């Protein structure tokens, strides 16, 4: 390396009490429990793994069809199919923890008490990095209730905060009128960070058979189609709360990732991209140092939220303005 070469940018990030080696995580429900992908991806290189959401008891999920490819994204109505917390702790988590990536356990309950009970169980398990509250699943009845109402969101986050010393992330839904107000509820409840976004409600139809394509009729849209919606949510929440944001929604490339970082996400999650290209996450991690350096920054943290908005006082920050 020439002596004038800059050191590689610092990729480490902080999400409240959660410290991660880099900002590229894999999203819940799109990476299984890690085992399925381990032949392709060295999990220890990831910023974090968020396994499929677990619930207190096993759930069979929704009737088929549960996924449909549309012209501009993936629709799913899995319905939180999972084996329940006991099976997760006994069979999936030990293996995943041994892989070396920070593990952020995604949990969902039908009531605040169920969320709190799950958090208390996880609190007793060594090695977990954080919990992510899935208050945003569009595919189960009442799945988004606690992510739609700011006060309910505050109460579930506060309940979980009281039950565990683990960092708490609240994963929010875009299927609301005012996502910022729900993020404020999460912040007031004590969330370390918010994850934005879960899927956008959608539907696919076979007009010849006059039938919906999903067994559950309505599902959640993900993939490139929802990136603009996710960016808009990150932007609105960034202006409303000071806690860190994890951006997710349609991130397929390093350019998508950088768009989220400059808009205000301190980290990102890769979701549907993993179905098309299981190594998308590692590709983006490998391309991140050059992209950060291209902005003239020495760390990922420096570029978070540096978006220059239109207006007389919003010129780009110097490191961005002078990037070659
Ligand atoms: C098949 C599928 C299953 C999912 N399951 C979950 C889940 O269990 N818990 C959760 O919080 N999000 C779940 N999601 C949402 C993703 O984690 C992510 O928030 C969403 O797909 C948007 O990101 P993307 O466009 O990169 O996929 C699921 C998404 C898909 C496509």
Image (cartoon, grey):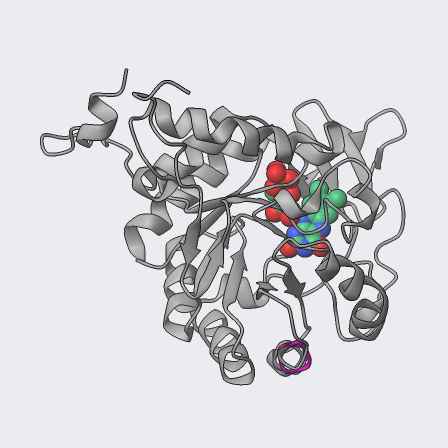
Which image quarter holds the C terminus? top left
**Which quadrant of the view contains residue 204?**
top right
* Residue under the image location 33 percent in, 49 percent down: 238
Q: Identify the residue at image location x=84%, y=72%.
A: 90
Horizontal side of residue 294 vs 129, given as left or right: left
Residue at 23% over, 32% down: 309
Instruction: Check the image and report above or below for 35 versus 184.
Output: above
Q: Is the magenta stretch mostly helix, strand or loop?
A: helix
Is residue 178 among the parts visible in the rendering? Answer: no
**Residue 94 showing in the rendered view:** yes
Residue 108 is one of the magenta-drawn residues? no
Q: Quick check: 35 left or right of 281?
A: right
> Which residue is at a point 41% across and 32% down the rendered structure image?
8
Residue 86: image location, x then y, percent = 82, 75
User: Can you give x and y, in whole percent of width and height, for residue 221 in the image?
Assistant: 66, 39
Image quarter in which the N terminus is found: top left
Total numbered labels placed on residues in the image? 0
Q: In the current view of this chain or complex, which residue is farthest to the top?
A: 324
Instruction: Tell me residue 243's x, y (percent).
Output: 36, 59
- Residue 7 is drawn in which quadrant? top left
Magenta highlight range: 118-122
């Amino acid at each position: 390396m020439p002596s004038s070469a800059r050191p590689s940018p610092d990729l480490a990030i902080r999400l409240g009490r959660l410290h991660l080696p880099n900002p590229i995580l894999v999203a819940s429900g799109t990476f299984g429990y890690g085992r399925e992908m381990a032949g392709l991806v060295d999990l220890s290189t990831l910023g974090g793994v968020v396994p499929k959401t677990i619930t207190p008891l096993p759930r069979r999920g929704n009737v088929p069809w549960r996924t449909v490819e549309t012209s501009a994204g993936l629709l799913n109505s899995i319905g939180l199919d999972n084996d329940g917390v006991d099976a997760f702790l006994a069979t999936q988590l030990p293996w995943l923890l041994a892989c070396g990536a920070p593990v952020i356990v995604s949990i969902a309950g039908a009531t605040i008490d169920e969320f709190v009970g799950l958090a208390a169980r996880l609190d007793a398990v060594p090695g977990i990095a954080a919990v992510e509250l899935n208050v945003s699943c569009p595919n189960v009845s009442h799945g988004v209730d606690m992510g739609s109402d700011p006060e309910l969101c505050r109460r579930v986050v506060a309940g979980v905060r009281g039950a565990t010393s683990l960092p708490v992330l609240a994963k929010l839904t875009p299927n609301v009128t005012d996502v910022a107000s729900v993020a404020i509820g999460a912040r007031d409840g004590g969330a370390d960070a918010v994850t934005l976004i879960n899927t956008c409600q959608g539907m696919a139809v076979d007009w010849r058979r006059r039938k919906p394509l999903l067994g559950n009729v309505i599902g959640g849209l993900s993939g490139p189609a929802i990136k603009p919606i996710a960016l808009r949510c990150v932007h609105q929440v960034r202006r409303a709360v000071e806690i860190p944001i994890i951006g997710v929604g349609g991130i397929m490339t390093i350019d998508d990732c950088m768009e989220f970082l400059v808009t205000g996400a301190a980290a990102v999650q890769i979701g549907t991209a993993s179905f098309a290209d299981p190594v998308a996450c590692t590709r983006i991690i490998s391309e991140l140092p050059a992209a950060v350096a291209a902005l003239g920054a020495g760390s990922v943290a420096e570029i978070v939220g540096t978006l220059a908005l239109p207006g007389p006082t919003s010129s780009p920050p110097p490191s961005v303005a002078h990037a070659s």
